[in-house]
Amino acid sequence: MGSRASAPCPCAERVRDAASGADTCAIVVAGGSGERFGDPRGKQFVDLCGLPLMSWSIMALDRAPSVGAIVVVCAPDRVAQVEKDVLARLSLAKPVTLAPSGATRQDSVRSGLDATPRELPLVAVHDAARPLVEVEQIEAACAAVRADDSLAGAILATRSVDTLKLVEGTTIVATPDRSFYWAAQTPQVFRRRVLLAAHKAAAHEEYQGTDDASLVERMGGRVCVVESTRDNIKITLPEDLALAEATLERRLLG
Ligand code: CTP
Ligand code: MG
């Protein structure tokens, strides 16, 4: 499985060769069991326009000029499947290493983070279950962090379109001002050392966050949003797949 942060990264030389100027290691978390999706193959492996679903985000990250290396996090018993059915079918320009997933998404990100090369100062954490991410969006998130030294990170997000209700039981207790609310997506890009410190603190304090930004925020790190599109959905329920298929077909055709 992937290298640990304390060991020299075996792919460091290739990182420099493959993408001079690239400063970001992508971490694709693909170690979930897809309970809500419900397919025994796991949602990251179901067919989407002729390829296993997780292939699409790996290809987008591979094409992003900021990305110099990719770490794919998957269950140890899925390594052969990822190598044969996903990686071997793509001709990727960037070096890919695999890291073992953990019991929670947060554990999986930490595992991936430990396998990232120190040479790349930024990391972009991405859900394998978001196949529709585009190169421009990845670049925008990386550029936001790069452009502002005071930022710990930047995440893709969309403005809330629905009116939000704060509800207790079934009773509405407040209607907050929608303009303050954004829906978080991935990639979430951070300075590698900051995200590593935030994960170590969270593990030490047994804190489980719902995304990586929340771990950095609670340490006082400033994280900004980069406006994304609603296309970049996370495949969660079976009906999400048809929507992804339609969007991808539209893109591929035209
Ligand atoms: N993930 C992971 N390791 C885990 C849990 C989740 O790498 N222990 C990954 C998933 O593979 C997915 C991403 O995190 O790409 C977002 O998680 P989610 O959409 O919740 O996927 P699952 O946990 O697989 O789905 P569910 O919650 O329905 O079981
Ligand atoms: Mg989950």
Image: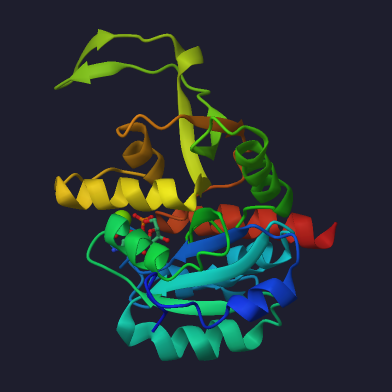
- Tell which of 140 and 42 is nearer to you: 140
Please give the count of numbered marks on the rendered protein.
0
The residue located at (49%, 64%) in the rendering is: 28
Residue 53 appears in the rendering: no
- Tell which of 220 and 49 is nearer to you: 220
Quarter of the image containing the C terminus? Answer: bottom right
Name above or below for residue 233 compared with residue 153. Answer: below
- Tell which of 144 and 188 is nearer to you: 144
User: Image check: 33 left or right of 95?
Assistant: left
Residue 212 appears in the rendering: yes
Residue 225 on image: x %, y %: 55, 31
Name above or below for residue 233 compared with residue 39. Answer: above
Furthest-right residue in this view: 254
Report the image quarter containing ligand 1.
Answer: bottom left
User: Image check: 154 left or right of 68?
Assistant: left
User: Image check: 165 left or right of 83?
Assistant: left
Residue 84 on image: x %, y %: 53, 91
User: How is the protein colored in the picture?
Assistant: rainbow
The residue located at (76%, 66%) in the rendering is: 20
The residue located at (62%, 53%) in the rendering is: 133
The residue located at (33%, 77%) in the rendering is: 75
- Tell which of 204 and 159 is nearer to you: 204
Name above or below for residue 196 compared with residue 67. Answer: above
Residue 184 on image: x %, y %: 46, 37
Q: Quarter-wise, where is residue 143 in the image?
A: top right
Residue 16 on image: x %, y %: 69, 72
Quarter of the image containing the N terminus? Answer: bottom left
